[in-house]
Image (cartoon, rainbow, N blue to C red):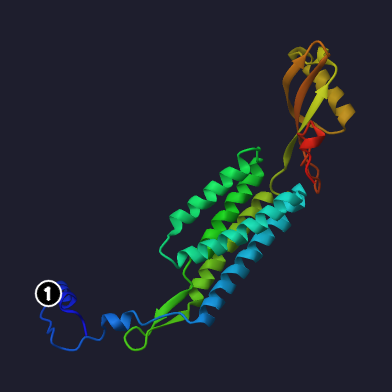
Amino acid sequence: MIPDFLFRLVQDDLSSFGDVDMNDDLPLDVQTITDAMMTTAQKVAELGIRFALNLLVCWILVHCFYYRKSRRRDYYFTFMIFSSAMLTLLYIMGNVEVGVGLTLGLFAIFGVIRYRTETVPIREMTYLFVIIALAAANGLAPIYNVVDVATTPHYALGWGNVGVMALVNGLIVLLVWILESESLVRHTTTKLVLYDKIDLIVPERRKELIEDLEKRIGVQIENLEIGHVDFLKDSAFIKIYYHLPKGESNSINTLTRAKDYVE
């Protein structure tokens, strides 16, 4: 039965709905509401659905879009492991009283420890944030509903919730596909060049400079920037902008030292 203090609280709340005889048997009580618990099979099925959907979407984003252009195996590994680990942690934390705030705080600390010593390219960082957002959505979105509350409350898989979660993932994949599509957007990339003819870097000889660079490098230059100039060694750093041909990548175009290259 309902405790006295809760009985009086419900009676006060129902006073605005007209005459209610509180002596009548109520269809619900506290014990009935709290009886619903997920079975072990339901918990395993829930984790399997979340993990499989998140892993599939992450693989599509990383393998079909990111890796196809960058060919960075280190980030491929990082994205896949990071996404799966975060979804698992968020799922576990979502079922205890620790809360999501602490979980996100832990990953922020991990991110600072891992990435503060090196510069992460903007494209890689964007994919990382997208993967984190998807892992959070897939790990916390409700997919089970409590049904038959009045009689025998229990959890049942809500296919509508699963459909909404799948739709969210599909929309993100579609957006990335549109933005990465070479037929819609021409991919402009950069190349860092150590140039030896510094007499051509002056503004009035810019046309000659572009013609010489195009002849020696073999690309059609859209724009360029003059960087550090060393008059003692007759050299200058020039950053050129050009359109990347279809199917090519530019993961090492801006590197100037062999030790910066990572396979």
Give the residue number, with chain letter if any, for mark 1. 15
Query: In which quadrant is the N terminus drawn?
Result: bottom left
Residue 237, horizontal then vertical, whole percent:
77, 22
Q: How many marks?
A: 1
At horizontal 83% and vertical 13% (from top left) the residue drawn is: 234
147 to 139, vertically: above or below: below
Residue 129, horizontal then vertical, whole percent:
58, 50
Horizontally, is 121 left or right of 200 in the view?
Answer: left
At horizontal 81% and vertical 43% (from top left) the residue drawn is: 245
Which amino acid, mark 1? Ser
241 to 141, vertically: above or below: above
Q: Residue furthest right?
A: 216
Residue 143, horizontal then vertical, whole percent:
49, 72
128 to 147, vertically: above or below: above
The quadrant holding residue 47 is bottom right
Horizontally, is 1 left or right of 237 in the view?
Answer: left
The quadrant holding residue 28 is bottom left
Residue 163, horizontal then vertical, whole percent:
53, 71
At horizontal 61% and vertical 47% (from top left) the residue drawn is: 126
Q: Is residue 174 visible?
A: no
At horizontal 61% and vertical 50% (from top left) the residue drawn is: 128
The quadrant holding residue 53 is bottom right
Q: Residue furthest left?
A: 19
